[in-house]
């Protein structure tokens, strides 16, 4: 079974310049202590679950387009503001939190600006690695 993604997991965007941290805030759908809260499919909110991935390098991003235009056509990345509109896929088929499927280290979600957000380090470790 794939490892579950928990609060504090390291995530990356294929069009961002730096990794980020997935946050599962206290009081959200996920149960347990904040340190071990399991992430679910719907944990995609910018500022709540996903923060910046540094600079965005997607030519589809209007901010990148504007920065490039301002630089007289020289491609110019812009600050990343994740814009994920669809849930993490595929979800766990074995674990759900309050009826919402958990996500695993194999789950990804797509930003509106065409970047793919994936899990770099899920935050959970298997008993065999301890």
Image (cartoon, grey):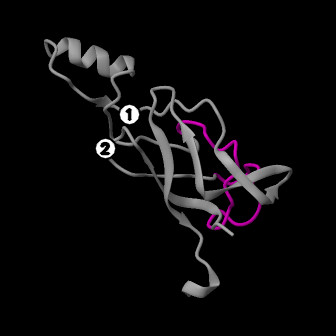
User: Total of numbered circles in the picture?
Assistant: 2
Dot 2 or dot 1, earlier in sequence: 2
Q: Position of residue 79 (x, y in %)?
A: 33, 31
Q: Is 38 left or right of 72, judged from the image as shown?
A: right
Q: Main secondary structure of the magenta part?
A: loop
Tell which of 108 and 71 is nearer to you.
Answer: 108
The residue under label 2 is 17
Element type where label 1 sits in the image: loop
The residue under label 1 is 80
Q: Name above or below for residue 19 compared with residue 36.
A: above
Q: Is residue 118 magenta?
A: no
Q: Position of residue 53 (x, y in %)?
A: 39, 43
Q: Position of residue 111 (x, y in %)?
A: 51, 32
Give neighbour class at mark 2: few <14, some 14-19, many 20+ (Cα, 10 Å): some
| Residue 38 numbered mark, or none | none
Give neighbour class at mark 1: few <14, some 14-19, many 20+ (Cα, 10 Å): many
What segment is highlighted magenta in the picture? Answer: 25-47
Task: Look at the numbered discs 2 and 1 and tell me whether their residues touch, using CB distance below 8 Å.
Answer: yes
């Amino acid at each position: 079974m794939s490892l579950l993604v928990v609060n504090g997991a390291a995530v990356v965007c294929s069009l961002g310049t730096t990794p980020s941290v997935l946050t599962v805030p206290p009081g959200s759908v996920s149960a347990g202590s904040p340190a071990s809260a399991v992430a679910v499919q719907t944990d995609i909110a910018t500022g709540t679950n996903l923060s910046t991935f540094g600079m965005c390098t997607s030519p589809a991003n209007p901010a990148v387009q504007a920065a490039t235009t301002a630089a007289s056509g020289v491609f110019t990345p812009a600050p990343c503001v994740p814009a994920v509109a669809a849930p993490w896929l595929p979800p766990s088929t074995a674990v759900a939190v309050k009826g919402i499927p958990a996500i695993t280290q194999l789950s990804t979600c797509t930003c509106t600006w065409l970047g793919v957000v994936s899990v770099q380090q899920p935050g959970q470790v298997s008993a065999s690695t301890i």
